[in-house]
Structures are given as C-alpha cells and as structure tokens.
Amino acid sequence: MKYDDLVEHLGEFGPYQRKIYLLTCLPVLSAAIQSLLPIFILATPDHRCSIPELTNDTYTTQDTGHLALQNHTLWRGGGDVSNPWGSGQCHNIVNRSAADPDALKGNFPFSNKTEKCNRWVYDTSTFDSTFATQINIVCDAKSLRSHANMIYMAGVLVGSFVFGLVSDKIGRKKAILMSLVFHSVAAICTAFSPNFPVFAFLRFVTGLGDVGLFMCCFVLAMELVGRKWRAQAGVAIQYFWCAGMFVLVGMAYGIRDWKVLQVVPSCCTVVIFLLWWSVHPMLNVCVRIMAELTACDATRQ
C-alpha cells in the first residue's frame, strides 16, 4: 500500500487536515511580509545636504531666510524635475557657512567649488523615518541597500539547504517552530539595529527563517492532503504569499515609522508560533508511521 492510498483511506481533505492546512498557510503570509519589508524600511526619500552649522535644518523651506541659506551653502548643479537638488544631495559649496554675514543678504560671489557633506535632511511627507535615513544610506553609501537585499537572499540560499535536511531529520512541526523562532526573533531585533553590519546579519537570519517557513509549510501541506486535492492545495498556499503583499502595503500606508513597521508584523509571527506550538505532537508521529508503513510494503513487494 502506498502513502497516497493510506491518505485516501483516512480522508483526502477532512476537517483536521483543513485545520492544519490553514496553519501551514499563515506562516507563508508572514514570510512574504518580511521578504518585501525592505521596499519600505530601506526606502530613500528626497534629501539634500544639511546646511552647515544649522542644527535645526529641515528639508522643507521654512521662509525666505532659510531659502537664502540654502542658496548660500548648497550646490544645485545637475538638478531636474525629479531631483531638484542635483549635486546638492551630496555636496556643499566650499567655504560657505550659515554663520557668514552675507548668508541672508544674497550678495556673495559665485563659487563652483564643492565638497562632500556628512549630514543630510530628508523629506518626511511620505516616510517619517526609514533605516536608510537613520544611518544615511545615500550618496557613496547608497549601494548598501542592494547589499542588504543580497545578504537576505544569501540567507534564503543557506536556509534552503539547512531546513530541507532539518525537517527530514526532526520532523515538519519542529522545523516550522525552529523557523518561526529564527524569523520572529531576528525580525524584531532588526528594528533596533544600530548600524548596517548588525542590520545585514539580522536580515540574513530572517532569510534563513523565511525560506524555512515556506519550504516546511509547503511540504507539510502537500503531505497532508490526498492526490485529488494536492494541486489545489499547492496553488492556494501561494495565495497567502500574495495576501502578505497586500497586508504589508496596508501596514506601510498606515505606519510611516520604519521601526514600528518592522515590529508589528514580527509580533504577529509570535502569535503564529503559539498556534503551531498547540498543534498535537502526534501529527509528526502519524506522518512518520505512515511513511514507514508504505516504505516497508514497497520493500516486500
């Protein structure tokens, strides 16, 4: 007797199977959110160099005096409609200070000598803050955004090997719980990253957990249902990935601070962990026994 024959005899998609199937879909939704969060938490709003010596500078022009200070100290070369500040995003005019008595008068000589700035102000009309604005991932450092995504995908690559072996060794439920721990702990800690190396490491660990969740949940879902429902179940679980995208968009629209946006869906994963913890431990045992029975019958035949 084959494994599929046993499942068909017990029921291909009964009430208990539907309950566990739904539980396998919820982590996929959470994994999708964490996978796409960098779109928002690493977003780089419009920005320009901060006016030297002006501690309360803002991206928005406050008055004519503020505009005069901008013209006095900031370089606007290469600007266009999409980027009005041009080179002023990364360069100040050399030897021009907000403390210069000519700053508010506008009667200063022309100068095209510039230097790189080390402080920036950001447009807060779309995002209150992002990780990119927190550590200034702009100008020469803007490649760090792609590096962060690359490191996350490296975690996905490693996790594909690790959790494939682990789930076969210790069982699907334990592997899912382990993935949820990696996923939720790393995601919550990401909100408190003080610098890029810490952020990148935590994104790597999050990638480990994300792919572990998706792989283990997908395989378990396919093992639970009979042949008649397997194709539909394989497609339906993907809908929860798509649902995660829509949920993230709604969260990002309502939550404009990147730390809060990072923590809220991560805390929801803790609830999913508790739900999986409550699943009867005999699930793994039953699946293992059924697999052993079919393997034994196949050997005898």
Image: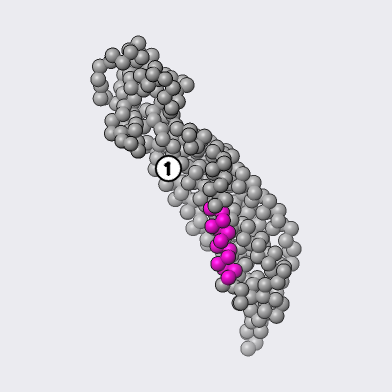
Image: magenta residue range: 232-245
Would residue 23 be seen by someone viewing this image from the given angle?
yes
Looking at the image, is 175 positioned above or below residue 133? below
Q: Is residue 162 visible?
A: no
Q: Residue at x 59, y 56 (%)?
A: 29
Instruction: Return the residue nearer the eye: 290 or 7.
Output: 7
Whether residue 244 is in magenta: the answer is yes
| Left or right of 222, for residue 14 | right
Q: Residue furthest top?
A: 101
Q: Residue furthest bottom?
A: 301
Which secondary structure is most common in the magenta stretch? helix
Residue positioned 64% across, 49% down in the render: 268
State which quadrant residue 98 falls in.
Answer: top left
Secondary element under disc 1, as helix, strand or loop, is: helix
Q: Position of residue 31 (x, y in %)?
A: 57, 54
Q: Quadrant of the C terminus?
A: bottom right
Instruction: Please name the residue that numbered disc 1 is placed on.
Output: 144
Question: Measured from the top left, where is residue 163 in percent x and y?
Answer: 57, 61
* Residue 107 found in image quarter: top left
Coloration mode: one colour
Residue 183 versus residue 81: which sits nearer the camera? 81
As rendered, which of 201 and 189 lies closer to the eye? 189
Asked if the stretch drawn in magenta spans residue 257, the answer is no
Determine whether 221 is above or below 3 in the image. above
Q: Quadrant of the N terminus?
A: bottom right
Q: Residue at x 66, y 60 (%)?
A: 23
* Residue 60 spot, x, y in % from top left: 43, 27
Identity of the residue drawn at 55% across and 37% down: 257
Amino acid type at circle 1 is Leu
Assess disc 1: are there few (<14), some (14-19) or many (≥20) residues with their C-alpha within 10 Å of its C-alpha: some
